[in-house]
Amino acid sequence: MGLSNTQYDTIMRQYSKRQLENRRLLEQHRRTAYEKIPELAQIDQQVSSESVSCARSLLEDGANGTAALKERLQALSARRAALLKDNGLPEDYLQMHYTCPDCRDTGYQDGKKCHCLRQSAIDLFYTQSGMKEILAEENFAHFSYRYYPEDLIHPSTGVSARDMMRATVAACLRYIDEFDSHFSNLFFYGGTGLGKTFLSHCIARELIERAHSVIYYSAFELFDLFARSSFGKENTWDGAREYVFDCELLIIDDLGTELTNSFVSSQLFLILNERIQKKKSTIISTNLPLSTFAETYSERVFSRITSCFQIFQLFGNDIRLQKKLDGTA
């Protein structure tokens, strides 16, 4: 799991909270049961005393002399269960109940991360990605090739819109499968409404489900955050730096829709350069044609893109318009 120290601490605080709540619930059960059945308090006190005697006997005499003590403990346990049952309480009413019985709310089972810890990480990644609701709809299960016509041919490559998208999706699936073993970045470009954002969301969904940290920003949101952190009075830089520079996958959507200036260009280079050095993956989508990208963001930014990103052109008709026309929007 790609947990930062801060993220891990956040999850461990959740486990501590569960443990405290479960202990509080047990104490509440104990008070209720003792008030209703006073004999239970006497039995529990006797069980505690007998258990200490049993442990002492084991230390002093080994297994000799413990049989009678074990029989008394079993008899007390049976009496305890009978009293609870006779008074309409579950037999396990005075036992600790765990949110995850497998790891007893520690996050670890037999020295390995429990399945509940993995799920906690996934839930945290969904929350911090800012895409939890939208990824429930925009994922590979809802992806359709019908919006990419077979008879629409790219004038330069001679390849149909559908075949181009099939090749792009296949590359994205390889990217997901190789994410842990092969550092790579993706760059999607093409006209409006061709599925660039949708495809980025599909990848994000798959990687979060595999417990990878993913953060999504529109270009406008990202550079507005950096501007407020750099020039405003808000103390947001540390948090922005942690998520933008250290998450396993950063998605920058709609690059080119923000107000582009020297500050934006310099910050984009900073983000790309640092993430490449750290081998942290990035996905960028833009409506800008490659011919104007370098002019918009500088040659050094364009150089990072061409040398360190897999570049895919999306081609076809505006899907948003198609959905409106056929009534599915």
Image (spheres, grey):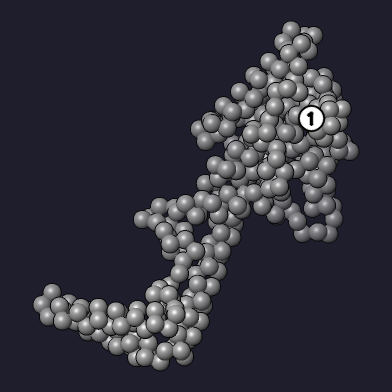
Q: Position of residue 189 (x, y in %)?
A: 77, 25
What residue is drawn where x is 85% and y is 55%?
Answer: 232
Nearest the viewer among 249 and 155 is 155
What residue is drawn where x is 79% and y is 23%?
Answer: 190
| Residue 10 visible in the current orientation | yes
Q: Report which residue position mark 1 lands on.
A: 286
Horizontal side of residue 124 vs 232, given as left or right = left
- Within-10-Å neighbours for mark 1: few <14, some 14–19, many 20+: many
Horizontal side of residue 43 vs 215, given as left or right = left
Quarter assignment of residue 170:
top right
Q: Quadrant of the C terminus?
A: top right
User: In the picture shown, does residue 103 fall above or below 97?
Assistant: above
User: In the picture shown, does residue 183 fall above or below 53?
Assistant: above
Quarter assignment of residue 271:
top right
Nearest the viewer among 35 and 302 is 35
Nearest the viewer among 293 and 123 is 123
| Residue 95 visible in the current orientation | no
Quarter assignment of residue 183:
top right
Nearest the viewer among 37 and 161 is 37
Q: Position of residue 58 (x, y in %)?
A: 17, 77
Labels in figure, total = 1
What residue is drawn where x is 54% and y is 42%?
Answer: 210
Q: Amino acid at mark 1?
A: Thr
Q: Position of residue 322 (x, y in %)?
A: 83, 26
What residue is drawn where x is 37% and y is 84%?
Answer: 83
Q: Position of residue 310 (x, y in %)?
A: 66, 24
- At numbered mark 1, what does the secondary structure look like: helix, strand or loop? strand
